[in-house]
Amino acid sequence: MTNNLLTVKDLTMRFGGLLAVNGVDLEVKEKQIVSVIGPNGAGKTTVFNCVSGFYIPTAGSVEFRGKELRGKPGHLIAREGMVRTFQNVRLFKEMTVIENLLVAQHMHAEHNLLKGFFMTPGFRKNEQEMMDRAAHWLERVGLLEFANREAGNLAYGQQRRLEIARCMVTEPKLLMLDEPAAGLNPNETKALDELIVQLRDEQGISILLIEHDMGLVMGISDQIYVVNQGEPLAAGTPAEIQANPDVIKAYLGEE
Amino acid sequence: MSRVTSAFVAALITLVLGGFLLGMSLTSEGINLVVETSTTGKMTVLFVGVVLVFLLQLFREQVGSFTSKMRSDERMELPSFLRTSQQQRMWTMFVIAGLVLFPFISSRGAVDIATLTLIYVMLGLGLNVVVGLAGLLDLGYVGFYAVGAYSYALLNMYFGVSFWVALPIAGGLAALFGFLLGFPVLRLRGDYLAIVTLGFGEIIRILLNNWTELTGGPNGIARIPKPTFFGLEFNRRPSEEGATTFHDFFGIGYSSEYKVMFLYLMALVLVLITLYVIRRLIRMPIGRAWEALREDEIACRSLGLNPTTIKLGAFTIGASFAGFAGSFFAARQGFISPESFTFIESAIILAIVVLGGMGSQLGVILAAIAMTVLPELAREFDEYRMLLFGLMMVLMMIWRPQGLLPMKRPHLELKRD
Amino acid sequence: MSESIFYFLQQIANGLTIGSTYALIAIGYTMVYGIIGMINFAHGEVYMISTYVAFIALAGLSMMGIDNPFLLIAMALAVSILVASAYGFSIERVAYKPLRSSKRLIALISAIGMSIFLQNYIRLAQGSRDIAMPSMIQGGFLFGDPDGSHIMISYMQVIIMVTTVLCMIGLTLFISRSRMGRACRACAQDIGMTNLLGINSNNVIAVTFVIGAALAAVAGMLLGLYYGVVNPYIGFIAGLKAFTAAVLGGIGSIPGAMLGGLILGISESLTAGYLSAEYKDVVAFSLLVLILLFMPQGILGKPEVEKI
């Protein structure tokens, strides 16, 4: 009925007696950057974990490209084209940068073991394609020169970019970033800003962003949702949000 | 507590630990149980143990600085003559040639031990896929070994299937068992998985022991025929009408050594195939996925990797190696019984993997050699073997969990022109 | 008709007897798991060792001229608890404490190594053959017709059940009332936080191991008297059974361990009574697999939430 990429309705998550998320709605359209903001502990990451299939929400629906995904396991949701990063970067630290990107393409990889044992031309071609795609994205995020280094040895900002590249090689429709600017310096944050906008404009994907740094969010978002203590507080364009007295009270007022 | 007091307390505890069990021994006298003081040998062990603990506690700092060196996280690099792939290939050829020539220049007994060692190498390599590469602790690996062995023995007993036909079937059946067991249990967390596999191994053994009509129960299955060389038997006389023996065909005199040599060479071929397959697996998408899964399962899921199928791959492949090894074992021994497939056997194979360094092929090979050849060289050692294995597993985990010979995994490199 | 009911009741009584001892051993697994999240694989060996110590003490004391069976048993039990506690404490210090920050599998392999080591240490020290103990407490209560259908509950069975109940009451009081018990519960919730509050978690962990070992020693004593034999290999199976009981009841939960032990004991004795004694181990293991698959949190445990 809508041309929404992702529609989340009435999402509710309860841990034992604790109501972590209560009745949150989200809409992400094609080629949009949408942000979820809120003070620490507002339940943003829980929303993310529910949408990406790491938690099974207590109630509500998660519809992605016309399919109901609530309760599906995380890896199936990723295969639908919804891929996420983590608040505290989760790279394969002992693997090299390029290997991180190859693992991410596992769903495109050749799975026939016999072809692998005998290194058939098809197998080699497939490996080469994955290699090329990985190299392409390393170049995009400016990490090509570190391709053969262990991921754990990269600087923090580089690790964040690698995590985004690792998502992008899976060719997602929706990229979900969990506080991507956390721990970055202002220059890095600015570069990240540009990268996110580029991903939308050049790759034509949508981005769902969690951030509590308002500065980053206001400049690039098409739509913003504010969550406070697990409850939806407001939704609108950056300008609307900035003018919303509730938001200012609950969120900006605190800082 | 001062250091002397704490050393004293530690020594006292050691005395409590050992005093009753080493210092006294139980014997039955008629229907009564009596207790006697032990032999001087055991008393000496007890005394030495108490003194040792006292001294270790007293000089704890010095000991600590020594052990922390061992704990270093360094991984072994290959020696300089093995750096390039060309050199590696050359040396590999050299070693293989040596192994092929080995049975022709050494005694029958040595060849026999070498064959046994090769079986353990194969089991170690197979379990290493599961434990070392995929990071899944499988304590019931011997169950798959038993499936392989009994597959050949039973197929031969009931249907007269020959070894060469049974070998792939045994591997396939073991893999099927691995798949069927793994499918439900691989969702479990690591330590639960370990216990479930242990239970599975025990169930297999109990079934083999009690299903007497099919398996012969504790008496096992005897007279399992040896493999043939393209249909040629290694017996003195053909086993049935129309069969030909090896020595008749080549017109040479009969010698039981041919059989031993043949078995050794076969085991060698099986090991080499195993090595090649594992070498390829590591460089394939599934091998990378194993490593990724070991590092961070949540990240894997977020990228669309299905942890269960990837683990299942490792489990099934590992099981199939055990199946191959099992059917070869049955053929070599000519006799199998549930006795050969106890938990201790699983523990030995695990000890090989742990000592060699989880994930390191070379390490596992060397560990398997050490574990099988040492008890043969020193018979007295045999009695203390399991004691030392157990001790070694604890010490290895504390000091060098990466194993004595951890290897850097070959990293895939991005080559740029 | 009535005969079959008596037979059934007899199996239940036997099951409750064995189940109580499983529960005693299972406490050790469940408490350790609750606090440091590892499977103390060597726990079954502590049980085995304590049976040996109990036998040695019983034989030694009776050779010294003590012939009152209750005094004999009480003294032997004290010795056995002392030695088992020393084992529990030392195992933790030697094999687990250095690995607290390691991955779970590393600690588990160390535990398996410890188990193999202890089993073989006893094998070398005491021989691998069965050692038999003449039964000390004979007779029992008979319900029904002595010549026809009846159930027989031996004094030994009564002692086992009563002792288990007493131990459980004692443990529950300790956990809920004492300072140390509170510290144990706090550590089970959040060990890092407990440390911040100034509770020495090393002591709490050591106490946990000692309690587990002491209860295993009680079980070792009771089962030793009940079966009258010991060999170095009894710890392995008993340990697995007790672990099954702990998982069945919900690992980390003390009432769960009690419940799990009783359920396992009854299902085993029913299998032995109606199917075949050989398959009772298969039933235990299958039960373990099924529970882990379909309700990994057990009957009384809490489901774990994955931290992302």
Image (tube, helix red, strand yellow):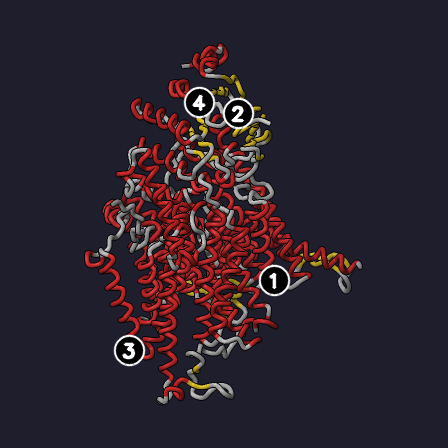
Left or right: A62 as drawn, with respect to C193: right
Front-lying residue, C265 or B283: B283
Dot 3: chain letter: B
User: Upstream in the sequence, badge 4 or badge 2?
Assistant: 2
* Towards the viewer: A203 or B389: A203
Q: Chain of mark 2?
A: A
The residue type indicated by label 4 comes to: Asn
| Mark-to-mark CA distance, 3 and 1 | 48 Å
Q: Depth check: A47 or B374 in front?
A: A47
Task: Name the residue that disc number 2 marks.
Answer: A27
Q: Secondary structure at mark 1?
A: helix
> Which residue in the protein does label 3 denote?
B106
Q: Amino acid at mark 1?
A: Tyr
Above or below, C274 against A94 in this view is: below
Q: Secondary structure at mark 3?
A: loop
Report how far apart the C-alphas of labels 3 and 4 lie in the structure.
73 Å
Q: What is the secondary structure assignment of the residue under circle 2?
A: strand
* Amino acid at circle 3: Ser
Q: Nearer the viewer, residue B147 or A142?
A: A142
**Mark 4–mark 2 distance (CA, rounded to whole Å):** 22 Å
- Horizontal side of B89 relative to A6 (left or right) equals left
Q: Are marks 4 and 2 in contact (CB under 8 Å)?
A: no
